Amino acid sequence: MVAEKCHLEEKMVTRIVDLRSDTVTKPTEAMRAAMASAEVDDDVLGNDPTAFRLEAEMAKTMGKEAALFVPSGTMGNLICVLVHCDVRGSEVILGDNCHIYIYENGGIATIGGVHPRPVKNNDDGTMDIDLIETAIRDPRGELLYPTTKLICLENTHANSGGRCLSVEYTDRVGELAKKHGLKLHIDGARIFNASVALGIPVDRLVQAADSVSVCLSKGIGAPVGSVIVGSENFIAKARRLRKTLGGGMRQIGILCAAALVALQENIGKLENDHKKARLLADGLRELKGLRVDTLGVETNIVFIDIEDGIQTRAEKICKYLEERGILLMQESSSRMRVVLHHQISASDVQYALSCFKAMLTTNQQVVKGVEKEMDD
């Protein structure tokens, strides 16, 4: 019956289940209404009242002195690194599988002249404390080596499947940074997901950090933007860098109004997103030919690996599912990624599972037919 349902829906695709990312959400009616009625002014001149409200709310929520709205998470991370590493040739220690190192176009190096020193990420997104300490340059070698200025963490860690860094681990890295006179930045694109999953208030989770970037358009579903938080002095420098990088916009209150709605309405929905991710992961694990690390599904990201010998590739599965209205991200020829968000229902999850099952069943029948012909 499940497979039949999938085959019926494929005849006329009226249902879209978009699992590519939590960045694909559409603004809610409440967000659109808030945007339409937002009180605005010129933020570059420092006068947009709705931007003030959002920045004050985020600073309070994150337990920091001040905050700054930026157009994107990539710009937010770049600004934070450049504020901390204010001398060209400075070095930042970060994970070899983290977003800043892999997916941000090498901006810290090409724009900022900051040298990345990658340390191996473990499967849970952490870096071994002793490896971090070993990577810190000896100041006595400054004639030859870059000068270590900063350590970066990512929480949740996207490439590790949305795994959460514990408050204990973050505190230990913070202590190490202080011991060596370094700063700690957290790429907290999905920090609210981590807070909800761990049951730790978000301000406590980032207490050890000197700066944090928080994405508004991922888990909490605002249409645009990120916010960076830190000390008043840090944010004053960040504001100037934002202008340098072309991120100073005018009536940003229109965007900030939607973000305020997201903070009020969607943080409480994250726990349900995590439940839907586990529901999907548990269902996929039961399907022959797929492998899912269900124990590693801590938040809203699920990686799906294709087992050897199944004689199909991720591209074929993605195409089959897309024809039935299910969109997901192909990571490689044998790996796919799905991300749950507040606009995916439990019914959508069941529909996706039914289509995965139908696809794999069809593939197995084809393989068996080919094998039978070869035997004959």
Image: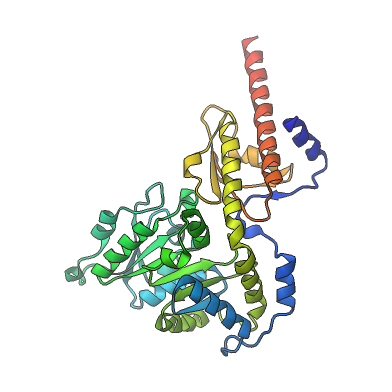
- x 37%, y 53%: residue: 126
Percent x, y of residue 347: 71, 44
- x 40%, y 46%: residue: 123
Residue located farthest toward the left when viewing the structure as drawn: 140
Examine the image and state in which quarter residue 168 appears: bottom left
Residue located farthest toward the right when viewing the structure as drawn: 12
Left or right side of 60 for 269? right
Looking at the rendered image, the quarter that the C terminus falls into is top right
Mark yes or no: residue 110 visible: no
Percent x, y of residue 345: 69, 49
Looking at the rendered image, the quarter that the N terminus falls into is top right
- x 74%, y 73%: residue: 33
Mark yes or no: residue 27 visible: yes
As drawn, 178 above or below 16 = below
- x 16%, y 70%: residue: 140
Percent x, y of residue 66: 47, 80
Frontmost residue, 2 versus 117: 2
Frontmost residue, 250 versus 263: 263
As drawn, 163 above or below 144 = above
As drawn, 352 above or below 201 = above
Examine the image and state in which quarter residue 368 appears: top right
Percent x, y of residue 196: 51, 57
